[in-house]
């Protein structure tokens, strides 16, 4: 091959290709106003909703950035803020019907892209790649949980 990629590149390049293809197909499906940055919100918001401070934590971002994205998606009709039933002062961000339709379309598109890649790489290779990536995710999550426990003094 000749080209040597570091791990960050090996993870980033296919991810960016997937995101680019996802957004081209979302646009063709009628969701052309969604940008890649909005994908972060869709990764964590469901029709049941999530509290804004939880969304900030999960996205590992600032409240200002998350508010900006939520406001943009709210203006486009993909999310809404509703009173938190557990805390009348708080708000929950949840998907609207349009947001749910976009999320479903996005999931279907990603499954299709993955299948296309499997067809190109071979099913066995793709299964092996998924298995290795899943193991890496589990390892990283476990290390992150252990670090959080250590940081909190447990």
Image (tube, rainbow, N blue to C red):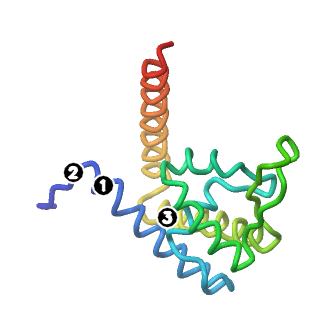
Relative vertical location of residue 146 with respect to residue 38 in this rendering, above or below: above
Q: Residues within 10 Å of mark 3 (few under 14, many from 20)?
A: few
Is 12 positioned to the left or the right of 81 in the image? left
Is 13 positioned to the left or the right of 154 in the image? left
Is 25 positioned to the left or the right of 85 in the image? left
Relative vertical location of residue 136 with respect to residue 147 in this rendering, above or below: below
Q: Which residue is under mark 3?
A: 119
Label of residue 6 in the image: 2
Most distant residue in the right direction:
85
Residue at image x 41%, y 60%? Answer: 121
Where's the N terminus, which quadrant?
A: bottom left
Element at label 2: loop
Element at label 3: helix
Q: Are marks 3 and 1 in contact (CB under 8 Å)?
A: no
Residue at image x 34%, y 63%? Answer: 13
Which is nearer the N-term, disc 3 or disc 2?
2
Q: Which residue is under mark 1?
A: 10
Relative vertical location of residue 137 with respect to residue 90 in this rendering, above or below: above
Number of numbered discs on residues = 3
Residue 114, horizontal then vertical, whole percent: 53, 61
Which is nearer the N-term, disc 3 or disc 1?
1
């Amino acid at each position: 091959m000749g080209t040597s990629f570091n791990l960050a590149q090996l993870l980033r390049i296919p991810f960016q290709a997937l995101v680019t293809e996802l957004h081209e197909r979302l646009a063709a499906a009628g969701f052309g106003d969604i940008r890649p940055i909005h994908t972060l919100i869709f990764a964590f918001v469901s029709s049941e909703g999530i509290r804004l401070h939880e969304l900030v934590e999960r996205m590992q971002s600032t409240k200002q950035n998350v508010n900006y994205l939520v406001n943009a998606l709210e203006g486009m009709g993909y999310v809404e803020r509703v009173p938190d039933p557990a805390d009348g002062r708080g708000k929950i961000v949840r998907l609207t019907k349009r947001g749910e339709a976009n999320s479903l379309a996005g999931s279907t598109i990603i499954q299709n892209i993955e299948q296309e890649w499997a067809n190109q790489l071979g099913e066995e290779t793709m299964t092996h790649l998924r298995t290795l990536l899943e193991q890496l995710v589990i390892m990283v999550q476990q290390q992150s949980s252990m670090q959080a426990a250590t940081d909190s003094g447990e």
